Amino acid sequence: MRSRRLAPYVLLIPGLAWLTIFFIIPLVQLGAVSLQSGFPGYPGYYYRDVNVGNYASALTEFGAHFGRSILYAGLATLFTFCLAYPLAYTMAFKAGRWRNVMLICVVAPFFTSFILRTIAWRQILADDSPIVRTLNALDILPGGHLTETWVAVVAGLTYNFLPFMVLPIYASLERADPRLIEAGGDLYANGFTTFRTVTVPLSMPGIIAGTLLTFIPAAGDYVNAELLGSDTSTKMVGNVIESQFFRVLGGFPVAAALSFTLMALILVMVVIYIRRFGTEELV
Amino acid sequence: MARRGPDLRGATGDLTLQSVTKEFGSFTAVDELDLVVPRGGFFALLGPSGCGKTTTLRMVAGLEQPTSGRVFIGSTDLTGSRPYERPVNTVFQSYALFPHLDIAGNVAFGPRRRGVKDAAARATEALELVQMGHLADRKPGQLSGGQQQRVAVARALVNRPEVLLLDEPLGALDLKLRRQMQVELKRIQTEVGLTFIHVTHDQEEAMTMADTVAVMNAGRIEQMGPPAELYDLPRTAFVANFLGQSNLVRGTVAADDGDVVTVTTRAGQVVVPSARATARTGDVVMGVRPEKVRLEQASDTPNLNGDNMVGPGTVVDVSFSGVSTQYIVDVPGLGSWTVFAQNLGVDAVARRGDSVLLMWNPYHAFTLPGDEDLTAGVDPDVVEVLT
Amino acid sequence: MTATTTSDREIRRLGEPTRISTPTRAKRWLADHVVAIIAGFVLVYLFVPVAYTFVFSFNNYTKSNISWNPVGSPTLKHWENPCGAPGVCDALVTSIKVGAIATVIATVLGTMIAFALVRHRFRGRGATSALVFLPMATPEIVLGASLLTIFVQGFSKVGLQLGFWTIVIAHIMFCVSFVVVTVKARLQSLDPRLEEAAMDLYANPTATFLRVTFPLVLPGIVAAALLAFSLSFDDFIITNFVSGDSTTFPKFVYVSYLRGIPAQANVIGFSMFLIAVILVILGQVISSRRKS
């Protein structure tokens, strides 16, 4: 009997220890760094302090970047949803035998490196590419180019997170009983009403999971902004953090403060979102 | 406390449950159960869902441990031991065949765990017994429900356990297959001579297959004995209503002359032989089964021949079901009585609205204690009102 | 309700606002299929960059693989010599090594946690679940940043420098959560009756685990391992923060972007895609064969 009581702890300790040492403690360290101060005159060297000023300066200087991160991530999540839902719906209800093929088609492109794919978009949307030349001929583009605009950045984010939205929604829809949807029609709801009142609520767990899996990484992304955006007007908070760590001497505390703020912001938004839309078990 | 292997696995004898109680928190599933199952018979534990029969079975198997009480096979105390230490095997309701092993692997599982040398040969033998030998290299997922059920039986039987437990094994099968399997299981039990304990909520199944039936309700055994005995002379309202159907009516004992008990009901006086009267004084409940009652038109003057008679009553419903016709008759003072009449002719004896008289041989009646709940054991889905 | 005649043009569905005039056959077909059409476009959209990568792996460029050079293209020379560009194959090997080590360790740790969560009762389940779930809810940049700070300001004191092993450590960390989720799902769908049946058939707890539980959970563990490997191989942001001088394949591509990505990267990238697709298809074929 004694060995049975020990068993769960023996199983848990290695993994939890790893997470504690390499996740929790680093976060604590990050918090500590965000409160550190630099030695005046010796950029790159820090001492432990409780310098809340780092946060103040970080937020005043880079507040716009925060706004842009949330905005771009939000837009990307919205667009991803609009593209993913029809795809997931088709896969769940109309695909029949082709369902597995479609599943592979959704997941497979993501085995090419994420960087390669984003760079591919950069070339595809470059100024001298057929697409941009056509759009310019039709005089649609205000600035004359797609890359180095927020459009390209949001488009990149949308593309990169599409499977994260498709798969959870598909999983939810696939589990739903199609007879429930038939019942909707049987009870005099037309196509759109059935969709609105029956299908969407049924797929709610998948929608919630998908939006979280898209928004959270997108808000912290910097690769899309780096490769597809401009150096001046589209930088997201991720870019700032990265440059503060690697290219600005003495930028550790500011970068740490920004990271912590980003995490806190996302956590708050996620908690509100889950409370609002239902506490589904996500894990 | 932990005894290992062979000494427990070698236990033989009757299965005895001694004051076995199982509580789940504040809910008592099994209440001071005393039971002796003689070795080598086919025993049925019958009761509605939630009566504790499956819990009892699991305690015999070792998958649950009693809160108090003891489980014996012969003189060996099995209480507290683990399932793999007991000479008991179970056929699960959902069959629980191992999906990753083929049929032969499933059946040979038990012998292999026990270290039996020719496990594969034993498995083949057991599969032949249930006529599944030709499917030995299929996987469970490729078999139909009936086939899976047979494999589950073989998987348990191959170990020649002292006691074989069957947990509603036929529940998922359609009617025809179920009937077939009932005969099969009975045949197998007779052939191998092991003790079978069959748990079911289907009273027909229990009565068909078992040598002894125990009717269980709310964690206790209401009555136990050969099926015919239970059916013919129920001792509680639950058994009267759960096994087949009964017409029950309240009354008071007016006289008891040693041979016959006279009961006064609101519809008149009836007599019951003393040997068949569980309750002989004060307020009692008199019962007679629907197929034992005959009805005749009130306008005819019936020949009584010592039968009890009540009525006239009005026929409220007539249902034809091939073999018999069911009449529901409203008799003032009795309420609604059901009569099953074998269809010996083409036309029904009575039609809706007819005024009829009900008669039965007193030797088919019985009495129960007056404090019994007349609706005990009645299927709650059936809308019938008994008074 | 009035009776309606059911000729093609006059079918009215209850609930449909009657002010919409009866659509023609073509419009009706479009309306019914608009969802599927969108889905089709999205599928094509998903493959555009892959196609681009594929096409440009055949480009006979001189300086950088950005515009298509009609002279000499398409060429097979990059495919013939996939390690031709300096650093490409080193980066690939590093990615594979990191992936292999991280996958093995993360799968073991994660499977153990999943078993504890599903099969045992213990105090602190809620906290454990939260701890496991949190890394998935944290943006990669925060994970990378925090690891960077602790490696630089803490572990460097014990001699751990940014490089191969810090990448491995970081990958194990973020893969564990995904392994737990995957294995947990599989474990929860396991019929507990099967283990009861095993015990009923004389298998003690060890034998039950080895003969019944483990074989049935194995597909989930394998899926988790594959997921962990894909996440590790394709990871960029966290890797970029903790890799120091070491280079994995995604980092190589990113860094060489400014100088111009060698087409060999396209070759390798597309090959990974092809291998993965083949593996997935093989897996499907095997599992459907098993069922029949």
Image (spheres, coloured by chain):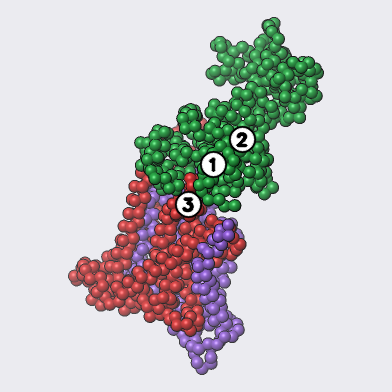
Chain colours: A purple, B green, C red
Q: Report helix, strand or loop for mark 2.
A: strand
Using residue A128 as the reference point, say whether residue A221 is left or right of it. right
Q: Which residue lies at the image location 33% right of the left edge and 62% below the top edge?
A: C273
Q: Pinpoint the chain carrying mark 2.
A: B
Residue in the picture at 65% in, 40% down: B18
10 Å crowding of disc 1: few (<14), some (14-19), many (20+): many
SS under mark 3: helix
- Foreground mark, 1 or 3, reads 1
B185 or B321: nearer the eye? Answer: B185
Residue C286 seen in this snapshot = yes
Residue B35 in the figure: left or right of residue A145 = right
* Chain identifier of the residue bearing label 3 in the image: C
Of all chains, the one bearing label 1 is B
Mark pair 3, 2: CA separation: 31 Å
Q: Is residue B39 above or below residue A157?
A: above
Q: Image point 37% across, 67% down: which residue?
A: C100
3D distance between C-alphas at marks 1 and 2: 15 Å
| Residue B55 in view here | no
Rendered location of residue C174, percent (x, y): 47, 68
Kind of residue indicated by mark 3 = Thr
Quadrant where the N terminus of chain A sits is: bottom right
The residue carrying mark 1 is B11
Residue B36's disc number: 2
* Residue occupied by mark 3: C208
Expressed as whole percent of the image width and height from the top left, the position of residue A174 reads: 46, 49
Name the amino acid, label 2.
Val
Disc ID at residue B64: none
Quadrant hosting residue C48: bottom left
Q: Position of residue A116 (x, y in %)?
A: 35, 69
